[in-house]
Image (tube, grey):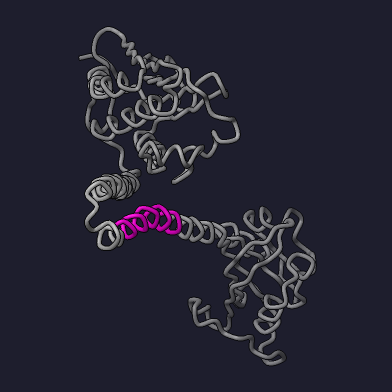
Amino acid sequence: MQQSTRQLGQIAQFLEAVPLAMLAVDRRMRVIAANAAAEAMFGPDLTDRPFVTVLRHPGVIQSLDWVIDPTGHAAPPVDPQLPAPPPGGHALRASITAKGRQIPCDITTSPLPPAMGEGALIALADGSGIEQADQMRRDFVANVSHELRTPLTALIGFIETLRGPARDDAGARSRFLGIMEAEAGRMNRLVADLLSLSRVESDERRRPSGRVELTGLLRGVVDTLVQRAEAAGVKLDLTLPPGEVRVTGDADQLVQVFQNLVENAVKYGGSGGWVGVSLAHVAHEPRLRGPGWSVLVEDRGDGIEALHLPRLTERFYRVDAHRSRAEGGTGLGLAIVKHIINRHRGQLRIESVKGKGSRFTVILPDRGTGG
C-alpha cells in the first residue's frame, strides 16, 4: 500500500528534523523522502528513485530487505560494537560511495512508524570526522614518540659508552655529558610544550576575562629577548603608539604568543640583521567584525617558500627539521600560538616571500582602549 499525501508530508517533516543524512523508502524500496543532509551526501532529486540507484551496498541492501520483510529474508549479521538498533531494525558499519568518494558510516535501518505506512528509514552517520580525529591522534602519538626516541637513544648510547670504553677518559666524559645535558634539555622543552599545548586546547572554548595592557606587555617581551637578539647580531626594534592599549586577554598566554613569534624571528629570520615589533590600531577587521589591535612581528631574513605557509601551525611541522632541532625548537610553538589566538577570538596571518623575510600578524579584538 502506498503512502498517502498526508503520510508523505509527515515523513518529510520528520526527516528534516533529524541532523543525520536520512532517507525513507516504501515496500517497493523506492525513495519516498530524503532530508537536506542526505541530498548533500548523495545529490539532489532522490525521491521516487529505486534505493539501489542511490546507494548500492550489499550490506545495506540486505539490512533493508530484512527490515521491510523479516519473514522472507535471512537476518543480517549483528555487529556487537554498534549500539542496539530500534526494534525490528538493523545497524552496520560500512564504507559507502557517495559523489565519487568513500565515506565511512554507521548506518541504521528501521521500520517506518505504523502511522506513516509500510517501509523503512535509513539513517547514515558520517564517520569521516571521527576517522580524521583518530588519524590525527595516531600521527600525534607517532610524532611525539619519534621526537622523544631520538634524544633518548643518544642518552642511552652515551651512558653505555661512559660505562665502558670512555670510563676513564676525562675529555670524552666531559664532552659526552655536555651532549647529554643538551638532549635532556630538548626532551624537557618538548614535555613542557606538550603540557602547554594540552592546557591551551582545554581552555580554548573559554574566552579570557582579564584585561591586558599591550604596550607594557610587548615592552617586557622585547626587553627579555633583546640580549639574545644582540648575541645573534640582530637589531630588535619596537614601535608602539602613545598611551596605554588595553584588550581582553590572558596576559601569560599573550606573552607566550609574542615571545614565541619574536624568538622565531630572531632564530630563523635573523640573517637579515633586523626584527621589528609594532602595534597599531585596525579600524575594522572583517573577520573580527569590528576594530582590533594588530601586533606585527617581521624580519628581513631568508623567508619561507609559499608551499609551507598553510602548514606552519600544524603540530611538529617544520620547514627545516634539522635546523629547527639544532636551534632547540620542538615543532609545537606555532601550534600553541594558533590555539591561544583562537581562544582570544583573534586572527593570525602569515606572509612570507622567499629571500625577502616574513611577517607574522596577530590581530586581537578591540573591546575598548584607554587607561
Residue 138: x and y in percent read 47, 60
Q: Is residue 144 left or right of residue 354?
A: left
Q: In the rendered view of the protein, which quadrant contains the N terminus?
A: bottom right
Q: Is residue 145 above or below residue 96?
A: above
Where does the image place residue 332, in percent across and percent down from the top left?
39, 43
Q: Is residue 258 visible?
A: yes
283 with respect to 252 (left or right): right
Is 115 or 36 nearer to us in this picture?
36
- Expressed as whole percent of the image width and height from the top left, the position of residue 96 reads 68, 66
- Residue pictured at 41% horizontal, 22% vertical: 270
Q: Quadrant of residue 207?
A: top left
Q: Quadrant of residue 36?
A: bottom right
Depth check, front residue: 299 or 364: 299
Magenta highlight range = 141-158
Q: As drawn, which residue projects farthest toward the left?
A: 371
The prevailing secondary structure element of the residues shown in magenta is: helix
Say if 156 sits above or below 238 in the image: below
| Residue 199 appears in the rendering | no
Q: Is residue 142 magenta?
A: yes
Q: Residue at x 63, y 65 (%)?
A: 11
115 lies left or right of 2: left
Would you place residue 9 above or below residue 299 in this image? below
